[in-house]
Amino acid sequence: MAIVVAYTAQDSGASALELAAVLSRSTGEPLTVAVVVTTPHAAGAAEFVDGDYLGPLRDWGESVLEQARTALPPDVEASFVVRAASSIPAGLLELAAEVDASALVLGSSSKGALGRISFGSVTDRLVHSAPLSVLLAPLGYRPTPGSRIRRVSIGFGGSAGASHVAAVGAAVAEALGASLRAVSFAVRPPKRIYGSVEESADDLVVDRWVARTTSALRAQVGAHDAALAERLARSLVVGEGVSWSTAIWDVEWSDGDLLVVGPSSSAPAARLFLGSRASKIIRSAPVPVYLVPAPRAG
């Protein structure tokens, strides 16, 4: 198996390559670094495509890949591919199927905030349709040299697919040799009148929320794997804030962290489809995110 990396000449490509190198170093899997060029031929208009058209596109793609070859650390094994396709998402998915990819790594849109994940048109399409795991790198992601994934955090929100996400996250942590924890986020509106609620009462609300979340985690994950449920319940960390961003940043994060997020409960079988809550978490995450497709039917 291999890890497919969507490379571009912009920061999104550099960040994706950095994350893919960290992942490859952690799993031992080689990388397939891809530049996709779009062509009318791939879209079914062969009469408009000949060598004069494709030649410059492929030359451009090879020049972009040369940047990737130069930037990739020498301890990471990789192959480099220029792919012609009707669209960039289609080309990446076709290539992922051909190499039996374990995951697809993408960078963030340059229009987003530094250190955060932002969806461009390609990313948005893939996180709502890909049949394999997708990893997203924050804009400007630059881990320390030689970095590996050290800790996997499983996002728990009580959705119907929580046990599936927990199982995948635990398997990822084991494959990477990383520690494992569960994280959840309590987003509550600010007090309407400052100081109108005693701090002790405010803390009690949070304590009750944490207790309910822990109980739900034990019940949902425990229905399939009691040992994993207990392990996650003991490791659960809850971030609290008046927004998704403040709640997520209330949790301690460090270099080498990976956040695992599941699909919407309405996602098609074996496909990614993010719900609104997952999208908010991803856009506020300060670390790379691993997106889990829905389980296969049956």
Image: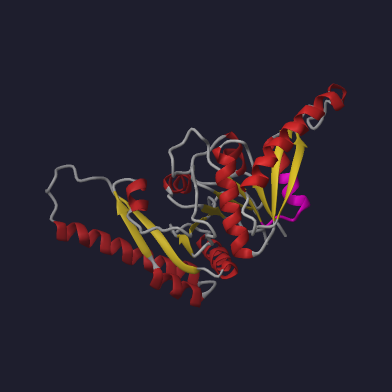
Quarter of the figure with residue 170: bottom right
Q: Position of residue 39 (x, y in %)?
A: 77, 29
Q: Is residue 87 magenta?
A: no
Horizontal side of 232 relative to 273 (left or right) equals left
Nearer to us in this view, 28 or 266: 28
Residue 97 highlighted magenta (yes or no): yes
Query: From which residue to which does the magenta span run?
Result: 93-102
Position of the N terminus by quadrant: bottom right
* Quadrant showing the C terminus: bottom right
Residue 111 in view? yes
Residue 230 position (above or below residue 132): below
Determine whether, in the image, residue 82 is placed left or right of residue 202.
right
Which of 181 and 158 lies nearest the eye of the viewer?
181
Q: Residue at x 41, y 61 (%)?
A: 183
Q: Image quarter for residue 238?
A: bottom left
Q: Give the prevailing secondary structure in the magenta stretch.
A: helix
Is 116 above or below relative to 76? Answer: above
Outermost residue on the top side: it is 48
> 292 or 33, which lies in front?
33
Q: Position of residue 204 (x, y in %)?
A: 21, 62
Residue extending furthest toward the bottom: 227
Instruction: Report the front residue among 96 and 256.
Output: 256
Which of the colour schemes (rainbow, by chain, secondary structure, one colour) is used? secondary structure
Residue found at x 19% / y 46%: 191
Q: Residue at x 68, y 61 (%)?
A: 29
Q: Is residue 293 visible?
A: no
On screen, residue 18 versus residue 117, left or right, reads right
* x, y percent for residue 156: 44, 60
Q: Quadrant of residue 127?
A: top right
On the image, the x and y values in percent for residue 278 come to: 47, 49
138 vs 185: above or below: above
